[in-house]
Amino acid sequence: MRFAKTFLAMALTLSAGPAFAQSLEQMAGQMIVVGFGGSDVSDASVKNLTAEIASSGIGGVMYLKVNVKSRAAVVAMNKTFIDAAPGGLKPFITLDQEGGAVERLTESVGFAEVGSADAIAAEYSPEQAEAVYARMAEGVAKWGFNVNFAPVVDLATNPNNQVIAKFGRAFSAKPDEVTAYAEAVVAAHHRAGLITAIKHFPGHGSSTADSHEGYVDITRSWEQDELSPYARMFNDGYADFVMVGHLINRNYSEEPASLAPEWIDGVLRTDLGFSGVVISDDLEMGAIRQHYDLKQTVVRAVRAGVDVLLFSNTAKPRASLPREVRAILLAEAEADPAFRARIEQSYRRIVGLKARIGG
């Protein structure tokens, strides 16, 4: 616990000042993490991303399985991305490596897989699980990644849940058990020099639909206990990113949580006291894409309090997506000083978190 709290204190201290004096355009670029279609350093999409990183046009990249053809290719791409970063401000090199059904690195490419969260919790104590996740985290780090979008802290309260319970992604239905295992995951990743993301705020475990497909209304199913792992982990110092889901609770807002200031500025930052980096879930999921255009998505997310905008770039894949997002951010900042201040604030938080990227 002391190790995790030290990391958190370091991030908060560094985020207080402008460690890197950059233009507004470069600050906006740091708020963008984007997926790509390539799987080798020679691919055009990889070269485009490398150029975007070099100009601070994006703050990081997101891997899917399509990007992983071999360990050698992944290591080479990640080295290329990191080497391109200006002024020591390394890119977030991200993936979802939860274990079980949600893995980008698999045995087929020589990565030692681990079981799903529910299987791990059934077989191991949190202390034993930490050793399992330590081996996984060490492998992720050796492949050149610095961010793992894990652990899931959703509660398995709905056994018929289509996106969490169906795939065994939750450790338990009990908040205390979820917290204990999630803290073990984070501690293991911190020892490997990795940054984590607890997800999917404010809680996807009780839902009856999948936000990949469309709107997910949790108004009737959601319970206050679903916030408990967040509150505990913030208090214990186990929080890097918080990933906000596209979940609607009409008792709080008519908008998905990822676009709702009531959830991010309100519950997450004010009520729960989180002062770190907020990242959206993929903003190309059906829950967002079917109801908002790109400008609406970007502007509403930032105004709600999102620091890092995550785009898988799979709905309509294009090299121009980062530039489109950046142009929206800059135009809105030009028109509204308050929006500009949001960008500057997010940039300071991002710099603070990136200061923890080792190697």
Image (spheres, rainbow, N blue to C red):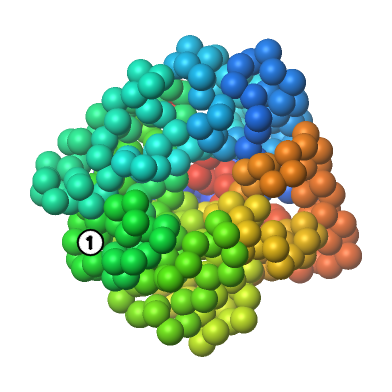
Query: Residue 148's x, y, as percent?
Result: 43, 40
Q: Quadrant of the C terminus?
A: top left
Q: Which residue is mark 1?
A: 172
> How many C-alpha atoms fall within 10 Å of the one at disc 1: few (<14), some, or many (≥20)?
many
Numbered marks: total: 1
Residue 53 x, y percent position in the rendering? 69, 30
Asked if one can make out residue 87 in the rendered structure from this viewpoint, the answer is: no
User: In percent of the image, x 51 and y 32: which residue is there?
Assistant: 65
Residue 30, picture quadrant:
top right
Task: Pick the residue in front: 92 or 71.
Answer: 71
Whether residue 280 sits left or right of residue 183 in the image: it is right
Indicate the position of residue 354 as horizontal and vertical percent values. 53, 39
**At 25% from the left edge and 40% from the top edge, which residue is drawn?**
115
For residue 197, say whether it is visible.
yes
Residue 129 placement: quadrant: top left
Residue plotted at (63% across, 59% down): 286
Task: Choose between 296 and 170: the one closer to the eye.
Answer: 170
Element marked by disc 1:
loop
Q: Does 218 appear above or below 333?
A: below
Q: Is residue 85 above or below residue 210?
A: above
Instruction: Judge from the rendering whether residue 302 lies leftward or rightward of residue 125; answer left or right.
Output: right
Q: Position of residue 285 (x, y in %)?
A: 61, 55
Q: Nearer the viewer, residue 67 or 296?
A: 67
**Residue 111 falls in image quadrant:** top left
Front position in the image: 192 or 344: 192
Residue type at numbered disc 1:
Ser
Identify which residue is drawn at 65% across, 30% down: 37
